Image (cartoon, rainbow, N blue to C red):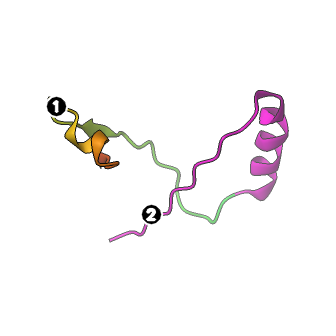
Amino acid sequence: MNEEIELKFIVQPEMLSALRQWLLAMGHDGHALRQLTNTYFETDGFDFRRQGIGLRIR
């Protein structure tokens, strides 16, 4: 099984161009790029959200 690490950042719109350039300069670690699809689930009563939980299948 592959291990996934997800980082989330809030980026100000005026910083997007600089961030893109920085990420492109970093390159990647040699793994083939893959298109991922996410499916999110929630109960009718939004029970997951109330508990601060998200259920995603990738």
- Up the image or down, 12 lies above or below 28; here it is above
Looking at marks 1 and 2 on the same chain, the residue that comes earlier in the sequence is marked by: 2
Nearest to the observer: residue 4 or residue 46: 46
The image quarter containing residue 39 is top left
Q: Which residues are magenta?
A: 1-27
Which residue sits furthest left? Answer: 44
At 34% from the left and 40% from the top, the residue drawn is 38
At 52% from the left and 50% from the top, the residue drawn is 33
Q: Is residue 13 left or right of residue 52?
A: right
Nearest to the observer: residue 46 or residue 12: 46
Q: Is residue 31 left or right of residue 22?
A: left
Mark linked to residue 27: none
Q: Label 2, secondary structure: give it.
A: loop
Residue 49 image position (x, y, % from top left): 30, 40
Q: Label 1, secondary structure: give it.
A: loop
Q: Amino acid at mark 2?
A: Glu
Residue 54 image position (x, y, % from top left): 32, 46
Between disc 1 and disc 2, the foreground one is 1
Contact (Cβ within 8 Å) of mark 1 with mark 2? no
Residue 9 appears anywhere in the view: yes
Label 1 CA crowd tier, 10 Å (few <14, some 14–19, many 20+): few
Nearest to the observer: residue 41 or residue 21: 41
At 42% from the left and 69% from the top, the residue drawn is 3
- Up the image or down, 8 lies above or below 18; here it is below
Residue 8 image position (x, y, % from top left): 58, 49
Image quarter hosting the N terminus: bottom left
Q: Amino acid at mark 1?
A: Gly
Which residue sits furthest front? Answer: 50
The residue to which callout 2 is attached is 4
Residue 2 image position (x, y, % from top left): 39, 69
Mark linked to residue 45: 1
